[in-house]
Amino acid sequence: MSSRLINLIVVHCAATPNGRRTTVEDVNSWHYQRGFRRSPAFRARQNHSLDAIGYHFLVYINGAIATGRHLDEIGAHAAGFNQKSVGVCMAGTDSFTLAQWDALRGNVQLLMDRYPQARVVGHRDLPKVAKSCPGFNVADWLRGDMAPLAGHVLEASRP
């Protein structure tokens, strides 16, 4: 069990071209350039080579989920809300592969089981956030039983 009280699960997008391979190392590099840093203690516990990543999870276009920060570690993904949140990022901007949608559903369901008090929101749903991130309406996605949202599925991933 996490040592932090988590009341938000925040869904993000990487703001990369839809369908382009984006790795946790890529995101780590971008976050390093923005001045994010992880504590040596948490780096020793998980992903020692990732010195700056702000997210806890990154969903790759093939549906694989890479870990970033440890769940006990405060993220750097939603200013003013990092202390009590977990950040999940989708590679891409606003259209995602079916594998990504499936992986996001599974990851968020696991987090909801672990943190039943937590609300699931998009980054753009937080107060004073002027972004379109994660590129889709998270409330609609939740209401639709976490099924892929029309208009947000990368066509190349359809069977």
Image (cartoon, rainbow, N blue to C red):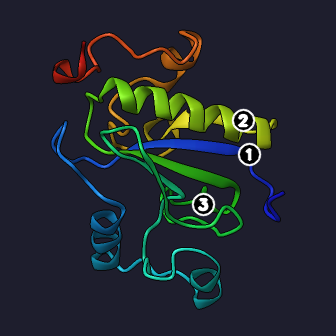
Q: Earlier in the sequence, mark 3 or mark 2?
A: 3
Sort mark 3 into few (<14), some (14-19) or many (20+) by Cα contacts within 10 Å.
Answer: some
Residue drawn at x 66%, y 31% as measured from the top left? 109
What residue is drawn where x is 58% and y is 32%? 106
**Real-space Cα distance between discs 1 and 3?**
10 Å
Quadrant in which the N terminus is drawn: bottom right
Residue mark closest to the camera, 2 vs 1: 2
Position of 18 with respect to 40 (left or right) is left
**In the displayed structure image, the side of residue 51 where residue 23 appears, left or right:** left
CA distance for labels 3 and 2: 17 Å
Residue 154 higher or lower than 14, as above or below = above
Label 2 neighbourhood size at 10 Å, few (<14), some (14-19), many (20+)?
A: some
- For residue 110, above or below residue 74: above
> In terms of secondary structure, where does tag 3 sit?
helix
Residue 111, percent from left and from top: 68, 41
User: Residue pushed farthest bottom?
Assistant: 40
Q: Which residue is mark 1?
A: 7
In the rendered view, does 22 fall on the left or right side of 133? left
Residue 44 location in percent, x, y? 61, 86
Foreground residue, 159 or 98? 159
Task: Please say whether residue 129 is visible from this viewpoint.
Answer: no
Find residue 136 and report its horizontal and vertical position in percent: 37, 26
Point out which mark residue 112 bears.
2
Residue type (three-letter) at the residue carrying disc 2: Met
Front one among 45 and 74: 45
Q: Nearer the viewer, residue 37 or 107?
A: 107
| Closer to us: 124 or 32 | 32
Disc 2 element: helix
At which x and y percent is residue 46? 59, 74
Question: Quick one: which residue is furthest to the front in this view?
Answer: 159
Task: Kindly identify the residue that appears in the image at 25 percent across and 53 percent down.
Answer: 22
Can you tell which mark lies on residue 82?
3
